Image (cartoon, rainbow, N blue to C red):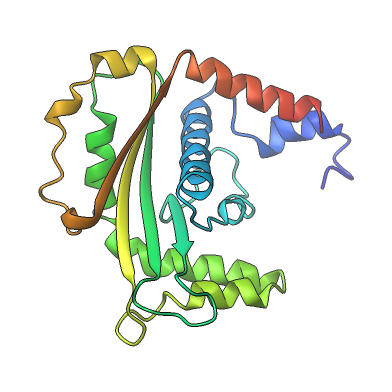
Amino acid sequence: MAGGTGLSHTDYLRSILFPDAKVAPGPSLRSGDFGEIVVADFIEYFLGYWCPRELRYQDRWNRNDSTKGCDVIGFKFANEDNPGPADELFIFESKSGMSASGANRLQDAIDDSVKDRLREGMSLNAIKRRFFDRGEMGDARKVERFQNEADRPFRRINGAAAILDEAVFAETDMAATNGAAHFNQKNLCLLVIRGPSLMKLVHTLYERAADEA
């Protein structure tokens, strides 16, 4: 893709593909994408869901615009050869807070997760279509299994995640978080991931990716 631009691979990534490091909304997109990827890794490698996260970012043509739809989607099959009501669809809303703002980002994630009821169908369709485009028909069929709940029942789990810098976590009243109004309250999972100097880590990861291209 860098061919014809006159740019090295490193400069191509920095100036055309990656969100801007300094000019808004680039930094917030970087932190948001980082948060989504961390949540996707968590549900895949700790909770055992299949989470084809790479598809969400592959068609982003505007580097400083976020990808629309559900943030993180995971799939789990009790028996891949025989779909049944024990199969699970896990949909996470992710919010990053890497600088002080006074907001409760976990509450923001819960509130925005309510919108996933409407975004679910479009997001599943987008994932399936990308698998079709890549000729990966088996994976497309796995997604298709969750597109008609009336005929093929499954368990739906919703999640809200906050990825926070330690300083932001320290000033957030997590006990005030309330999920009572969520449409899937009985199957709503909350996740908080925190660490020091997260924004510095995010920028460092982008620079390393560019330098190693």
List the single residue furthest toward the bottom. Answer: 151
Q: Quadrant of residue 123?
A: bottom left
Instruction: State the residue in front, 26 or 157.
Output: 157
Spot occupied by residue 188 in the image (x, y as percentages of width and height): 24, 51
Above or below, 204 against 157 in this view is above
Q: Is residue 42 left or right of residue 179?
A: right
Above or below, 78 against 17 in this view is below
Q: Residue at x 29, y 84 (%)?
A: 150
Instruction: State the residue in front, 79 or 150.
Output: 79
Instruction: State the residue in front, 155 or 137.
Output: 155
Q: Residue at x 24, y 44 (%)?
A: 110
Spot occupied by residue 15 in the image (x, y as percentages of width and height): 71, 31
Q: Quadrant of residue 22?
A: top right
Q: Residue at x 32, y 17 (%)?
A: 168
Spot occupied by residue 172 in the image (x, y as percentages of width and height): 23, 20
The total number of labels drawn is 0
Q: Is residue 64 left or right of residue 178?
A: right
Q: Quadrant of residue 170?
A: top left
Above or below, 55 against 155 in this view is above
Q: Residue at x 74, y 34 (%)?
A: 13
Spot occupied by residue 163 in the image (x, y as percentages of width and height): 40, 30
List the single residue furthest toward the front. Answer: 79
Q: Is residue 16 left or right of residue 77?
A: right
Image quadrant for the C terminus? top right
